[in-house]
Image: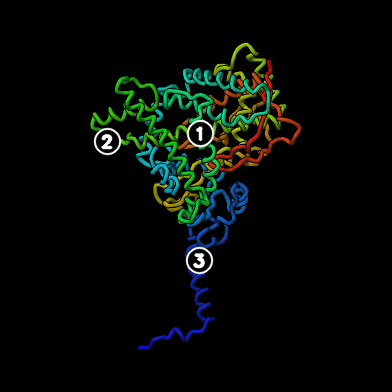
């Protein structure tokens, strides 16, 4: 038997062997298996293609779409990410093949915060039962009906008074707008609203806003979980999780109070009461179900975040666009003045007559691009899609920006132009490509609530105030801040009473 004395190998041999071994490992770990959608070249070890991305994914994704087509893939860390572009592709996946594409992927932060329970993070039978239950309850409490519109109008009245209290002085309306919009979903979930100066609730609003921004930086942990073990909290993961847990403490307190209250009052007064009642009825009938405390807690959190963040962000974007496009603001006011005047507040019955305002709201949702990638989707199983093999463990991103800002669809997508949504007859038209709330089975649950809120808030704000820049300094930037959503950078505005 011949043995090799390793001590006889010279340093050059060791170096060459090491380089070859590392090169082989790199190639094996980063090569793109045959059948996958095309994408950027060789990924780097450990980080994949992350070095090619900035905090705002849109520039890279737009470039790669031009290079590789409407279905491309990349590696974020060790995770394969498949990006779907354009309405035909997204519609084929999320609508025609919904049975395959309606899951959620197993992502580190989702698991840590939600345990894949509730409405947003769950999949399969669990998600179907949670969504069905939530939709039934929300409809019972007036989602999309006039009874809910009247409650929103009451909240708008409080909001207008709070804006008036600033007497036209420069003010950042972010927190006030968040609390007011949040009160609408709070009335449905908890059966109560919160005062605008409630320090505890203000604290939760600020935590929510900061988490929406920080989650962009912490998202890297979804693709490289090993980074969580680095000293400190470089990617703000611990901070994001800690804030989420504090909000869950608040939610659990609300659920506990509702359980005590139900011993004296059995009527369904809000979402929590209705959910608890339905769970108990199923249990008494020996029907197996998932209506438990953990799913209720996560569903409440999902509804709260969805019912607060995107609508309040859209209102802020509208005010910012008004500063840059005062003629649009003036045209909206003139329409409101002609249809309603100043003697009463706008109502949902006015909506069909305020066509230019409706087109302006649509243009805000398109141009602001508030949720450019939607929430990531997962697969029920490996699938052949448009000639490519997509494995079950891939993360699928329906890239809504590729539809809402597609030059081939809109012509001049970077321009803010409400008229693009109006036909020759002066009536609003809704192109199929207008999908700011997503499409398919996982379309935004609160779309009807959001659109009702946006109309009532903005119609009343425009009726009552003229929005002007704070002074002679340059206008606030239209460049958004990428987090979970794209939000405007903080800015101040003067709300000048019209009457």
Q: Check disc 1 and report its element: helix, strand or loop.
A: helix
Q: CA distance from mark 1 to mark 2?
A: 38 Å
Mark 2 nearby-residue class (10 Å; few <14, some 14–19, many ≥20): few
Q: Nearer the viewer, residue 424 or 366?
A: 366
Return the x and y of residue 4 as percentages of the image width and height: 41, 85
Reading the chain from its start, which is encountered first: label 1 or label 2?
Answer: 1
The quarter of the image holding the N terminus is bottom left
Q: Quadrant of residue 441?
A: top left
Query: Can you identify the residue that label 2 sits on?
Result: 288
Going from N to C along the chain, the mark reached first, 3 or 1, is 3
- At 58% from the left edge and 20% from the top edge, which residue is drawn? 351
Name the residue carrying label 3.
Answer: 26
- Quote the CA–CA distance across marks 3 and 2: 48 Å
Percent across and percent down for residue 181 are: 53, 27
The answer to the question of whether label 1 and label 2 lie on touching residues, with beta carbons closer than 8 A, is no
State the residue in front, 237 or 360: 237
Residue drawn 70% across the image and 27% down it? 468
Distance between the alpha carbons at the discs numbered 3 and 1: 47 Å
Label 3 or label 1, whichever lies nearer to me, is 1
Q: Which mark is residue 67?
A: none
Q: Position of residue 459 (x, y in %)?
A: 61, 21
Q: Are marks 3 and 2 in contact (CB under 8 Å)?
A: no
In front of the other: 136 or 14: 14
Asked if residue 419 can be seen in this view, the reply is no
In the image, 349: left or right of 476? Answer: left
Tell me the number on the disc at residue 203: 1
């Amino acid at each position: 038997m011949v043995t090799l004395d390793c001590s006889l190998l010279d340093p050059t041999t060791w170096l060459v062997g090491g380089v070859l071994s590392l090169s082989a490992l790199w190639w094996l770990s980063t090569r793109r298996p045959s059948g996958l959608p095309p994408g950027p070249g060789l990924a780097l070890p450990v980080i994949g293609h992350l070095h090619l991305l900035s905090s705002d994914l849109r520039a890279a994704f737009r470039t790669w779409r031009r290079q590789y087509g409407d279905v491309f893939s990349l590696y974020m860390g060790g995770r394969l990410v498949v990006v779907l572009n354009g309405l035909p592709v997204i519609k084929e996946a999320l609508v025609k093949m919904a049975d395959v594409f309606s899951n959620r992927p197993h992502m580190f932060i989702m698991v840590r915060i939600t345990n894949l329970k509730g409405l947003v993070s769950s999949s399969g039978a669990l998600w179907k039962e949670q969504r069905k239950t939530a939709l039934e309850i929300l409809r019972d409490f007036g989602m999309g009906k006039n009874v809910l519109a009247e409650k929103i109008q009451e909240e708008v009245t409080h909001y207008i008074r709070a804006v008036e209290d600033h007497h036209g002085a420069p003010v950042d309306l972010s927190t006030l707008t968040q609390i007011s919009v949040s009160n609408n979903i709070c009335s449905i979930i908890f059966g109560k609203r919160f005062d605008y100066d409630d320090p505890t609730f203000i604290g939760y609003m600020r935590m929510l806003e900061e988490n929406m921004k920080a989650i962009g930086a912490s998202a890297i942990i979804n693709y490289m979980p090993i980074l969580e073990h680095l000293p400190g909290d470089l990617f703000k993961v611990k901070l994001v999780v800690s804030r989420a847990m504090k909000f869950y403490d608040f939610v659990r307190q609300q659920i506990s109070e509702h359980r005590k209250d139900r011993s004296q009052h059995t009527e369904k007064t809000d979402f929590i009461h209705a959910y608890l009642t339905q769970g108990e009825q199923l249990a008494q009938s020996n029907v197996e179900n998932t209506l438990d405390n953990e799913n209720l807690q996560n569903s409440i959190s999902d509804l709260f975040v969805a019912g607060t963040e995107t609508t309040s962000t859209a209102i802020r974007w509208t005010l910012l666009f008004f500063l840059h496009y005062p003629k649009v603001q003036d045209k909206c006011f003139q329409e409101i003045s002609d249809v309603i005047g100043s003697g009463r507040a706008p109502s949902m019955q006015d909506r069909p007559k305020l066509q230019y305002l409706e087109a302006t709201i649509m243009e805000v949702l398109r141009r602001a691009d508030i949720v450019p990638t939607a929430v990531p989707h997962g697969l029920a199983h490996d699938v052949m899609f448009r000639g490519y093999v997509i494995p079950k463990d891939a993360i699928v991103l329906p890239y809504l920006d590729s539809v809402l800002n597609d030059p081939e669809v809109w012509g001049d997508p970077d321009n803010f132009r409400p008229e693009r949504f109006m036909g020759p007859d002066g009536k609003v038209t809704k192109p199929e490509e207008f999908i700011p709330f997503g499409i398919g089975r996982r379309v935004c649950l609160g779309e009807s609530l959001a659109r009702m809120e946006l109309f009532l808030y903005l119609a009343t704000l425009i009726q009552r105030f003229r929005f002007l820049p704070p002074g002679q300094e340059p206008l606030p930037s239209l460049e958004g801040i990428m987090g979970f959503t794209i939000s405007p950078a903080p800015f101040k505005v003067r709300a000048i009473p019209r009457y």
